[in-house]
Structure formats: structure tokens, C-alpha cells
Image (cartoon, helix red, strand yellow):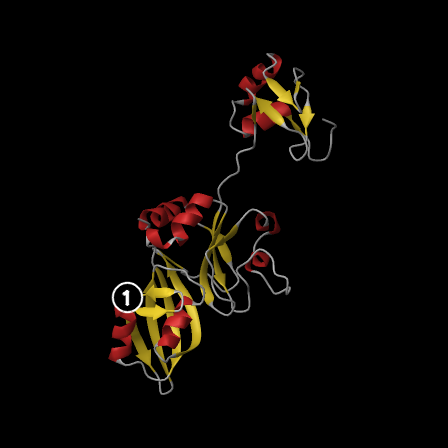
């Protein structure tokens, strides 16, 4: 319980952990109901280091309540959706505030060269609901492929394709436009398997030139520029949760 740069008053720590208000926490300390490192503490001026000292109330360890964080980032190509990389490639977490980097992790993934909407959060339940196929949250991609896309190919993607790791089918497929050399598709899926959209296209004889996620559930990037991020609003988080089954 030595005072350090990270020290906080015990009653403040208890209040931040949701045990009681600061005034009520002071009463708990005075009554001898709080232990620090298994020693009863009754002095109100006591300071603790949350990273070192163990606080207990009624025999249970008291941990601070961590605010839930929900971010949307416009991922550029050439960034990895991971928290670390042995090859020392650029990571999407490098694009956010250093104070947030160690708190959040990507919600699912986008391939190294895929761009667009990626979410990050520290809410484990939210991450599970957004990524597990059983919750059927729709992700929409804009896909640039080489050559012509026929109605038969579109029907095949809608009907379902058997890949090496199992069958998959799109929720929706739309031919957006054509140029002399390329076709532009909008493909919506509820799964997040690695390289899924690329594998679906390749199974139909299509070469993916460019791939970008443009929507995650009800959310779109709006005016968010590549490499930029922002916090989701409470209403956006509620909409995302409502979009999962």
C-alpha cells in the first residue's frame, strides 16, 4: 500500500468499482469491512495502487468497472486486423488513440488488403453477437472483379457455393455496374470466415481486384475517411444489437 504515481484513495477506488458511493465507501472502511492484501483497513486516508494491491469486500475481490468502448474505423489496405504481428506489419489498432489500443480488439476481421468498415470493442458479449454466424448480422461488401459477371454467376452466389471449409451463400447479390474490363458487385453475407468473399468469387471464376466492406448491420461509414475512427453513439450500439438474432 505504498504510495505511487498510480495510487488512488481507497474510498475513490471502491466508488469507481460500483461497490458504493464514496461516502458509503468511507463508512465501509471505518467499519472494517474492507481488506487490502488480506489486511483489514480502517484508515480513510489509505491509498492503493490498483495494479498491485488486491482489494476485497465481503471476501470477494473488488475490480474497477471498465467503461464499454465501441469504435468504428475505416480500414485502409495494408493493415492487419490483429493486436500483434510477428512479421511487424501495420495494425489497425495503431490508427487509434494509444490510450484505447490496449483496451479494445477487432470485432471480426477484414483481410490485409481489404478496406472499409471495421468495429473495435472491449465488450466480449457484443463481439460474440456481432461475429457469430448464428446471430446473422449482415455485412455488405463492394466487390470489383475482373471481367463480366453473368446472371448465372449471380444466381450461383445466391443459391450457395461449397467451399473447402463448408457451404456458404450470400444474403443478397447485386450487379452494380460494369466497365469494359471490370464488374462491380454488392454482396451481403452473415458469416465472417477468412477470405470468404474472395473465395466465393474465385469459386465462380471471378478474380477480385478490390474489396471493401461498406456496411456492418445497419451502420455505414458515412463520411468517415480512410484511417479515421470514431466512437459509436448509444443509439448505434442499440441498433447493432437489435440487428442480431
User: Quadrant of the rendered structure where residue 169 is?
Assistant: bottom left
- Along the line of sight, the residue nearer the viewer: 113 or 233: 113
Q: Disc 1 designates what residue?
A: 172
Residue extending furthest toward the top: 31
Q: Residue at x 68, y 31 (%)?
A: 7
From the viewer's perspective, is 110 left or right of 169? right
| Residue, far bottom | 180
Q: How many marks?
A: 1
Q: Quadrant of the N terminus?
A: top right
Image position of 60 with respect to 184: above or below: above
| Residue 109 or residue 213, whichever sits in front | 109
Q: Secondary structure at mark 1?
A: strand
Looking at the picture, how far across and down is residue 58, in whole percent? Answer: 55, 19
Residue at 57 percent of width and 16 percent of height: 28
Q: Residues within 10 Å of mark 1 (few under 14, many from 20)?
A: some
Query: Residue 67 appears at what percent x and percent y?
Result: 51, 39
Residue 153 screen position, x and y as percent: 29, 77
Q: Can you say whether 85 is above or below 173 in the image?
A: above
Going by the image, does 226 lie left or right of 183?
Answer: right
Point out residue 64 in the picture as x, y percentages from the top left corner.
Answer: 56, 33
Question: Is 78 located above or below residue 219 in the figure?
Answer: below
Q: Quadrant of residue 137?
A: bottom left
* In this rendering, position of residue 222 left or right of residue 94: left
Amino acid at each position: 500500500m505504498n504510495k505511487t504515481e498510480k495510487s488512488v484513495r481507497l474510498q475513490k477506488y471502491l466508488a469507481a468499482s460500483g461497490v458504493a458511493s464514496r461516502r458509503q465507501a468511507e463508512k465501509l472502511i471505518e467499519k472494517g469491512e474492507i481488506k487490502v492484501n488480506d489486511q483489514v483497513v480502517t484508515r480513510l486516508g489509505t491509498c492503493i495502487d490498483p495494479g498491485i494491491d488486491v482489494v476485497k469486500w465481503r471476501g470477494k475481490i473488488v475490480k474497477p468497472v471498465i467503461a464499454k468502448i465501441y469504435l468504428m474505423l475505416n480500414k485502409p489496405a495494408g493493415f492487419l486486423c490483429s493486436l500483434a504481428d510477428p512479421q511487424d506489419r501495420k495494425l489497425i489498432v495503431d490508427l487509434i488513440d494509444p490510450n484505447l489500443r490496449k483496451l479494445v480488439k477487432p470485432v471480426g476481421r477484414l483481410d490485409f488488403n481489404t478496406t472499409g468498415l471495421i468495429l473495435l470493442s472491449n465488450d466480449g458479449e457484443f463481439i460474440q453477437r456481432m461475429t457469430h454466424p448464428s446471430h446473422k448480422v449482415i455485412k455488405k461488401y463492394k466487390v470489383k472483379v475482373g471481367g463480366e459477371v453473368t446472371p448465372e454467376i449471380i444466381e450461383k452466389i445466391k443459391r450457395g457455393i461449397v467451399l473447402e471449409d463448408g457451404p456458404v451463400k450470400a444474403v443478397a447479390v447485386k450487379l452494380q455496374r460494369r466497365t469494359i474490363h471490370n464488374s462491380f458487385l454488392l454482396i451481403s453475407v452473415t458469416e465472417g470466415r477468412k477470405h470468404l468473399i474472395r473465395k466465393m468469387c474465385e469459386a465462380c471464376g471471378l478474380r477480385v481486384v478490390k474489396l471493401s466492406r461498406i456496411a456492418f448491420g445497419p451502420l455505414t461509414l458515412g463520411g468517415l475517411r480512410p484511417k479515421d475512427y470514431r466512437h459509436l453513439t448509444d443509439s448505434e450500439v442499440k441498433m447493432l444489437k437489435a440487428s442480431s438474432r
